[in-house]
Every structure is written in C-alpha cells, then in structure tokens.
Image (cartoon, grey):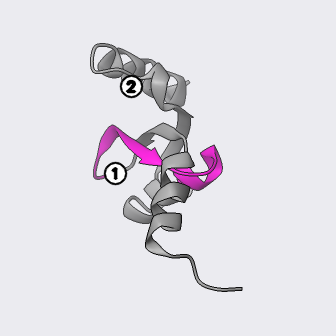
Amino acid sequence: MAPLGYKQCVFTTLLMPPFAVFFADEAAVGVTRVEAPDAATAEAMVMEDHPGARVHAVDGATVTEENRVRLLGAWLRQQCQ
C-alpha cells in the first residue's frame, strides 16, 4: 500500500471529530481541544502531556467558551466525590 499523500492526510484529519478533554494532575487542571478518531484516543493524547492525569473526553461541540469553566468545575467536583 502506498503511503498517504498530503491531500489524503489533510482529508483524513478533517474527518476526525473534535473532542474537549478535561484533565487534572498535580501540575495543572484544564480542558483542551483535541481532534482524534475516538474519545479513548483523545484521552491518550492528553495523557502524553499529562502522564498520570485524570482525563475525560466529551464531544467538542458541547464545550463552548461560555460554559467551559462551569463544565470544568462540575467535572472536578465529580472527581472529588
């Protein structure tokens, strides 16, 4: 099989859904956007930067600039229970 060309790579990337990944570790707490084929891959990508962190991926469309702080707070409260 021939390697993917530039146009194929770009097209493949555009098909990946956006995820918002909440994360918390000893160094940082936050939510970041990741394009990945599935939620597990999105979480793994964030864990590369934050090894040992608690992570949770959700549909990127559900997290907006207006609600991201509220949703992050709700997720953190769930982690403490």
- Give the magenta range: 26-43
Residue 52 visible to the viewer: no
The quarter of the image holding the N terminus is bottom right
In the image, residue 76 above or below residue 27: above
Residue 54, percent from left and from top? 50, 46
Residue type of the residue flagged with mark 1: Glu
Type of amino acid under label 2: Leu
> Most extreme residue toward the bottom, as rendered?
2
Q: Which of marks 1 and 2 is in front?
A: 2
Residue 48 x/y as whole percent: 44, 65
The residue singled out by tag 2 in the image is: 72
Instruction: Report the residue marked by disc 1.
Output: 26
In the image as oriented, which residue stretches furthest toward the right? 1
Q: Residue at x 64, y 86 (%)?
A: 2
Looking at the image, residue 68 sits to the left or right of residue 35; the answer is left
Secondary structure under badge 1? loop
